[in-house]
Amino acid sequence: MTVKLISHTLIEKEGKYLLIKRSKIKRGLPNVYPSYWDIPGGSVEENELPREAALREAMEEVNQKILIDKIIHEDSQFDASKDTVFTRLVYAGRITEQRDIILVP
């Protein structure tokens, strides 16, 4: 069995939260939960801490530098078809430097 760690951040600014809409295709393949609304996040890479992954994903997905406050949620699910446990950490964060958000269709 494989264990995959995923790191997300619920990003808040002035009482509003940043959401992204998941793409239909990712790396040439159908994406998981296409067209669903989500918060920035993704896989924790080898030799990377979950907090570092959350910071990286915020830059990659929404071009925002953020400050992470704390972990607000953790859950795990087993996907029998992939023989993998997916563990997700969700952090609370806030934008530290306002940058343009670039929309990609």
Image (tube, grey):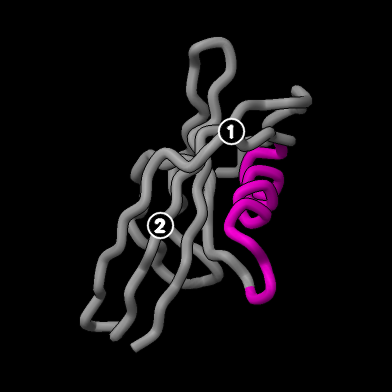
Is 26 rendered above or below residue 65?
A: below
The residue type indicated by label 1 comes to: Asp
Distance, label 2 to label 1, CA atoms, is: 17 Å
Q: Residue furthest bottom?
A: 1
Q: Position of residue 32 (x, y in %)?
A: 36, 61
* Front in this rendered view, residue 96 or 38: 96
Query: Which residue is found at the position 75% from the left and 23% from the top?
Result: 98
Percent across and percent down for residue 64 are 70, 35
Percent position (x, y) of residue 96? Answer: 74, 26
Quadrant of res 52: bottom right
Q: Nearer the viewer, residue 53 or 33?
A: 53
- Residue 89 is left or right of residue 60, and the answer is left
The answer to whether 5 is drawn above or below residue 40 in the figure is below
The percent coordinates of residue 20 (x first, y second) are 49, 38
The residue wearing badge 1 is 69
Q: What span is colored magenta in the figure?
A: 46-64
